[in-house]
Amino acid sequence: MEPEPHHPRRAPTAAMDPPSPAGARPAMSHSSAFLLPSSATPAASADAYAVVVLNQRLPRFAPLLWDRAQVRVCADGGANRVFDGMPELLPGHARDDVRSRYKPDVIKGDMDSVRPEVKEYYSNLLCILVLGALGGRFDHEMGNINVLHLFPNIKIVLLSDDCLIFLLPRTHTHNIHIERSVEGPHCGLIPIGAPSTSTTTTGLRWNLDNTHMSFGGLISTSNTVDEDQVMVTSDSDLIWTISLRH
């Protein structure tokens, strides 16, 4: 069933730096090709990825994504998911070997969700445990626009059971390549930190054209991809979310 058309309601916009002309912004490309088997992955890519595992069941391709990431972070109870889930996804390997290989670089949070034995295990493997360094729960901090700018040369990918999320900083235009064998068709764009007074897209079933988006008004959360390339330009930091195929 196609979603009913949204009718935006104007809301006060928070103060933000005036956007640069779209032509002056550098372009940033995004692709989920890292989820494809090695034989189907395009030749060498310069992209660098950071993986943040929340307290969600790991999808089938988690080991592949983990291997290809440069930074691997567990948000609090996400450490339990890696500890329990990686051996389940690799049943032909010894559980201790899998846990030793797939260990997080950092576990971040208030540690109220990490089981004691999991915390002790990763501590003995010299994983970095960070308690509240960003001021609170890491899963909440990922909704803070400042996180977009912590790692300017690393794309941040959020992984859950049924969707993939890219963070799209307003400082760039964005070219998103759709891998139809592993993702889609459902997708969404959500402003974070401040409303968007102007977001434009191509490649979606219901494209945005200098559209205002804000909570309490229009947010493009019920869209679908219509082409293999999606272009996004916005004056606000955005979350791009797309469903994953199982």
Image (cartoon, rainbow, N blue to C red):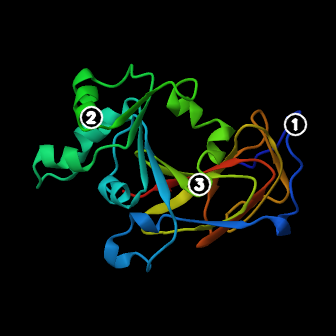
Secondary element at image label 3: strand
Relative to 128, does residue 161 appear above or below in the rendering?
below
User: Farthest residue in the front direction?
Assistant: 126
Q: Which residue is mark 1?
A: 15
The quadrant where residue 191 appears = top right
Relative to 99, 179 lies left or right: right
* Residue 164 in view: yes
Marks 3 and 2, how far apart at CA: 35 Å
| Mark found first going from the N terminus, 3 or 2 | 2
Relative to 113, does residue 198 appear above or below in the rendering?
below
Secondary element at image label 1: loop
Location of residue 142 in the rendering, given as x and y in whole percent from the top left corner: 57, 37
Relative depth, front residue between 115 and 186 = 115
Location of residue 39 in the rendering, given as x and y in whole percent from the top left corner: 32, 78
Location of residue 201 in the rendering, given as x and y in whole percent from the top left corner: 74, 62
Marks 1 and 2, how far apart at CA: 42 Å
**Callout 1 touching callout 2 (CB < 8 Å):** no
Relative to 78, does residue 224 appear above or below in the rendering?
below
Secondary element at image label 2: helix
| Mark found first going from the N terminus, 3 or 1 | 1
**Callout 3 touching callout 1 (CB < 8 Å):** no
Relative to 174, 104 lies left or right: left
Camera-near label (1 vs 2) is 2
Marks 3 and 1, how far apart at CA: 28 Å
Relative depth, front residue between 33 and 123 = 123
Question: Quick one: label 2, few (<14), some, or many (20+) residues within 10 Å?
Answer: many
Q: Which residue is mark 2?
A: 122
Tell me the quadrant of the picture where the C terminus can be found. Answer: bottom left
Location of residue 60 in the rendering, given as x and y in whole percent from the top left corner: 30, 54
Q: Residue at x 37, y 30 (%)?
A: 77
| Mark found first going from the N terminus, 1 or 2 | 1
